[in-house]
Amino acid sequence: MRNARMASVLGLGGLAMLGLAFASKPLYDTFCRVTGFGGTTQIASQAPEAVLARNVVVRFDANVIDAPLVFRPLQTDLPLALGAHGLAFYEVSNVSDQDVTAIASYNVTPHKAGRYFNKLECFCFQEDVIRAGETRRLPVLFFVDPRMDEERNLDDVRTITLSYTFFQTDNFDPAAKTAALN
């Protein structure tokens, strides 16, 4: 009887840990989106009505991991009032003789500004096929939430860097991506 109870408790504990393992990624993604943790930006459906006099400079960064792509921002920085729309373009070129399926991951620095950086439209929301030899201009429409001005710990933020990293998703090797990021 005692062994059966112990086996039941251990079995339930194992099932609970397995359930948490499966739930950890969606829970972590939700946590990052809600808090801006790790520079995770927000996705907005509409821009705020208020535009403040406070400006920040948004800088643009582009990287590629293990893909035959050339990827760059078309401008280096953009002064932007809090609450105003910003529009930036990146350019991606497939320099190979084969189509590449790729997606861009993204974040902002300083990380504490991620909670206030909002994208209205972005090429990074979905995986895309870039044809052999093709060059494309990719837009991102964004704003910095004016509520950032109410946060005293963000008074020192004068520059926000928006960074994208393109990586190939067909023949994707997660170990290679992790090694390249470290």
Image (cartoon, rainbow, N blue to C red):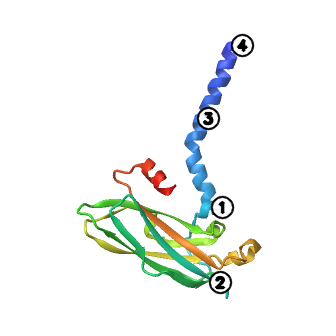
Mark 1 or mark 2: which comes first in sequence?
1
Q: Where is residue 47 drawn, in percent x and y?
A: 58, 77
Residue on which disc 1 sits: 35
Q: Quadrant of the N terminus?
A: top right
Give the numbered dot on residue 2: 4
Indicate left or right for 59 with 166 as reference: right
Residue ranking furthest to the bottom: 53
Residue on which disc 2 sits: 50
Mark 2 or mark 3: which comes first in sequence?
3
Q: Residue at x 66, y 78 (%)?
A: 146
Indicate left or right for 29 with 104 as reference: right
Tell me whether circle 1 and circle 2 mark residues in contact (CB < 8 Å): no
SS for tag 4? helix
Residue on which disc 3 sits: 17
Tell me whether circle 1 and circle 4 mark residues in contact (CB < 8 Å): no
Q: Residue at x 56, y 73 (%)?
A: 161
